[in-house]
Amino acid sequence: MNDNEHLLKHIAKEPSAGYDRKIMDYIHNAATHGLYEIRGMGAKRAVPNFDDLVLLGASLSRYPLEGYREKCVTKTVLGTRFASKPIELEIPITIAGMSFGALSANVKESLGRAATELGTSTTTGDGGMTAEERQSSKTLVYQCLPSRYGFNPDDVRRADAIEIVIGQGAKPGGGGMLLGQKISPRVAKMRTLPEGIDQRSACRHPDWTGPDDLVIKIQELREMTDWEKPIYVKVGATRTFHDVKLAVHAGADVIVVDGMQGGTAATQTCFIEHVGIPTLAALRQAVDALEDLDMKGKVQLIISGGVRTGADVAKALAMGADAVAIGQGVLYALGCNHDAYTLDGAVHSACDDYANLGTAAGFCHHCHTGRCPVGITTQDEQLAQRLMPDLGAKRLKNYLKTLNMELTTLARACGKQNVHHLEREDLAAMTIEAAAMARLPLAGTDWVPGF
Amino acid sequence: MDSLSFDLAATPLRDLNRFLHKEAVTQGIRHVTVLHPDGAHNIAVGLDAPVAVEIAGHAGYYAAGMLKHGEVTIQGNAGTGVAENMMSGKVHVKGFASVSAGASAHGGLLVVDGDTSLRCGISLKGGDIVVGGSVGSFSGFMAQAGRMVICGNAGDALGDSLYEAVIYVRGNIKSLGADARIEDMAESDYQAVGELLAAAGFSYDPHEFKRVASAKSLYHWNADANQEY
Ligand code: SF4
């Protein structure tokens, strides 16, 4: 091969940055099927996140608390603004709203049992409240979604708090989806839908439109519940500063902000990857809005979307959240993307089941198919046996306990007797992007980009 | 004494709703009159007892919202979302109703003597709605189950993305929404319309009505159907 041939060979194989393998596959797939891709879980692209922040532990200018001996309070109270019965939690880590339909009834029960043992809350989802989750959850937040599937006054009265869902981080501006495989007889009945249809939920509430209407809708739910239960408002992260202000004006007790990394059971990939802003940016905007209105501490803030570790929780609290909500982390704790499952006390490989879905453990996002290899996001009775409530509750409890231990360890290292005393001053950013979004100084400097 | 009246010009709404939720049944009150409602929002929301509530005037948003068992009569007009998410019982609006009347109602009967605005019966889940006048655009949007009887005309996009709910219209339909179609009336349809008209107190002939139901072409994803979403 002469030099020229060698050169030509390289040029012939030059990959295109704009049309790389991924985008070519996307176009081939679109041309073959004429339909957008729908999948589960959250954004896979890299976005600035809590890993881009570090905590400034105590040294000479601050002194730390003894890691294993000194007390560090984690108690968290939500809904103190108007509700006569606020939610009191032992830890600031809650379980995010996920539907029965997306998840099996066994999983719903696992979540309730683990949350109850650790003194935190679980949340219903699109599709209503199941008896299993009400019975197993000491503190249950009942979502009022645009679809209103299964929404009814008895469950409103049975709930401990009501969450009006305006949007979700994975798809702000879009409605939920549940593909036919998951519309089992029970799911269909709860949602008043024909079995097996590809369900697309509404993206707007049927009985109110703007923030002025929301004032009256919130008042309705308060009147319904005799002003006892906290009313949460959940928004997907986009124009978070304004949305949080409007939700506060509308009378919310608690605001839940779900960043773009937040998961979903089934949504168009173009939504998951391209709509919304990262949790880090949204959290800062939400806190700014509350501070601007002098409502910090009066209206509580829950942040969700890519909260995975105790360090994430500590950083979220330091930035100004009162609590976090976890969805995908919970699924992983239950065994999502694990290569094996336990059935009748024996461990079985799930590799063939992942392969049948065209994926492998570690890469799966196939919740929308209803064929979850480890029995989490399924309505198939046999698959659902792969995650029984005893094991599910135990694994989730361990995960939440670990997060809480990490949280308190880090808080003590920052010299805090109460995790809610973590503050922005305890943080620095590792990248310019994170510094700009979280509006924190770049580590080792006092430079906040743009300020 | 089994009746009581609340004058909203002098008594807060909270007192009325608390009474309806917690005391009406225990005190044996079966009939409550609400005086001077003057468009107040959230009157009688969450009523869960066989109590008749008569609203002597106009009601604001969500009157009789999430009703179960009770019977609520509004002598005047009703604001947004009257009888929204009703489970059972009956709501009768003697005047006109604003947007989203009977939204997401799972059961019970909503009767509106006059017209309703946009999105009447949106997201309906099993309730029945009878409108003496006409309904605005997007009525019956994504209605899942239940029946609507419209004695007047229907606006644009009637029954868009319908599931299993059925809409009967006596007058003109400005346009049908995606996946809604006019179907032949069967004997069971005439009977259903007759019963609903009788329950609502209207004397129209069921044979004057046409049936709108779902063509079910949106039930499953199909790339070649050129779906708009
Ligand atoms: S393992 Fe199950 S829960 Fe996890 S992504 Fe795959 S289908 Fe979804």
Image: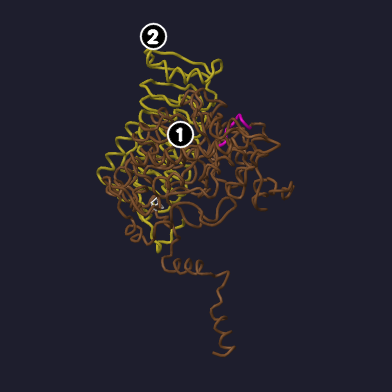
Chain colours: A brown, B yellow
10 Å neighbourhood of mark 2: few (<14), some, or many (≥20)? few
Residue A160's image quarter?
A: top left
Which residue is located at x 46 percent, y 39 percent?
A400
Instruction: From this view, report whether residue A304 is shown above or below residue A85.
Output: below
Residue B39's image quarter?
A: top right
The answer for which chain carries disc 2 is B
The answer to if A300 sits in the magenta stretch is: yes
Q: Amino acid at mark 2?
A: Met
Tell me the mark number nearer the camera, choosing from 2 and 1. 1
Mark pair 2, 1: CA separation: 45 Å
Q: Amino acid at mark 1?
A: Ser
Q: Main secondary structure of the magenta part?
A: loop
Asked if one can make out residue A222 in the rendered structure from this viewpoint, the answer is yes
Mark 1 close to ligand 1, CB under 8 Å: no
Residue B169, image x and y in percent? 38, 44
From the image, tell me which residue sits under label 2.
Answer: B1
Instruction: From this view, report whether residue A451 is shown above or below residue A358.
Output: above
Which residue is located at x 32 percent, y 32 percent?
B198
Secondary element at image label 1? strand
10 Å neighbourhood of mark 1: few (<14), some, or many (≥20)? many
Q: Which residues are magenta?
A: A296-301
Work out which quarter of the rendered image holds the N terminus of chain A and state it. bottom right
Residue A246, image x and y in percent? 61, 37
Asked if one can make out residue B110 in the rendered structure from this viewpoint, the answer is no
The answer for which chain carries disc 1 is A
User: Of B56 and B152, which appears nearest the observer?
Assistant: B56
Give the number of the disc on residue A121: 1
Extreme-left residue of the structure:
B187
Which residue is located at x 58 percent, y 84 percent?
A7
Specify whether disc 2 shares its chain with disc 1.
Answer: no
Residue A145, image x and y in percent? 46, 40
Instruction: From this view, report whether residue A8 is shown above or below residue B119.
Output: below
